[in-house]
Image (cartoon, grey):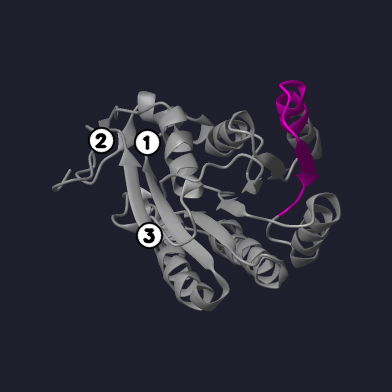
Amino acid sequence: MSMGVSGKVALVTGASQGIGRATADAFARAGARVVYAARRADAVAQAAEAAAAGGAETLGVACDVTDPTAVDALFAAILDRFGRLDVVFNNAGAAMPATETGDVSWEDWRRLVSVNLDGAFLVARGAFRMMRAQAPKGGRIVNNGSISAHAPRIGSIAYTASKHAITGLTKTISLDGRQHDIACGQIDIGNAASDMTAAMTKGVPQADGSMKVEPVMDVAHVADAVLHMASLPLEANVQFMTVMATKMPFVGRG
């Protein structure tokens, strides 16, 4: 039986655009109290205010997930406003153009791993601490993996390494969370239409060196999937879910 998310406090990172915005808005429409977190203060305020105008209870927080002090301040703001935290969609991420391994700069490697892995850890750690300490204790963390957590694209070493690492993050949080009623799952998304995947409609480098346009799906399907994961009672968990454009190159060898 679905417990729903009405009245729950949900945090979404990377919430000002794309998958994060669509998912945060879906939580708001479903009656959750939603914390919109993203790096740009103007964009995150606009997103939170738009949802509040629709009747939702929201909080917008500007937060660079790569900065431990900023992440600590985010959770302090959530505690101050709502007193607890039930769900986190650990979604903030970065990408870069396809670049062969030998040509990836240290700066680009660090930038991607800092956002995609360090940031995901810092948010998960803050959520874990809060969920462990609150009464009633517990909650759910949903990490945004990717198809790249399973199979790389050509020229994607930093992104793919960071997304493979998210799988290890998810599994360990799941184990550590058992005694605290903290459930953790991962959603692996393939070709959801957003700013990050705009290139899909123009052509994407393929493993054989060719460029091909790839199918995409509406980002609303991702939001619905995260909402389903979040709506389960804490004794049930979607450990891993893959939601993807049906005809994108993944299954098989292309």
Q: Amino acid at mark 1?
A: Asn
Bin the neighbour count of mark 3 within 10 Å (Cα to Cα): few under 14, some 14-19, many 20 and up: some
What segment carries the magenta color? 47-64
- Spot occupied by residue 224 in the image (x, y as percentages of width and height): 45, 35
In the picture of the structure, the residue carrying the numbered disc 1 is 191
Residue 113, quarter of picture: bottom right
Q: Amino acid at mark 2?
A: Met
207 or 40, which lies in front?
A: 40
Which residue is painted at 78% across and 46% down in the image? Answer: 62
- Closest to the camera, between mark 3 and mark 2, is 3
Badge 2 marks a residue whose secondary structure is loop
- Label 3 and label 1: CA atoms lie apart by 21 Å
- For the residues labelled 1 and 2, say whether their Cβ atoms are less than 8 Å apart: yes
Residue 63 among those drawn in magenta: yes
The image's mark for residue 248 is 2
As drawn, the residue found furthest toward the top would be 54
Query: Taking 1 as reference, is 223 above or below it?
Result: above
Residue 219 appears in the rendering: no
Residue 111, quarter of picture: bottom right
52 or 201, which lies in front?
A: 52
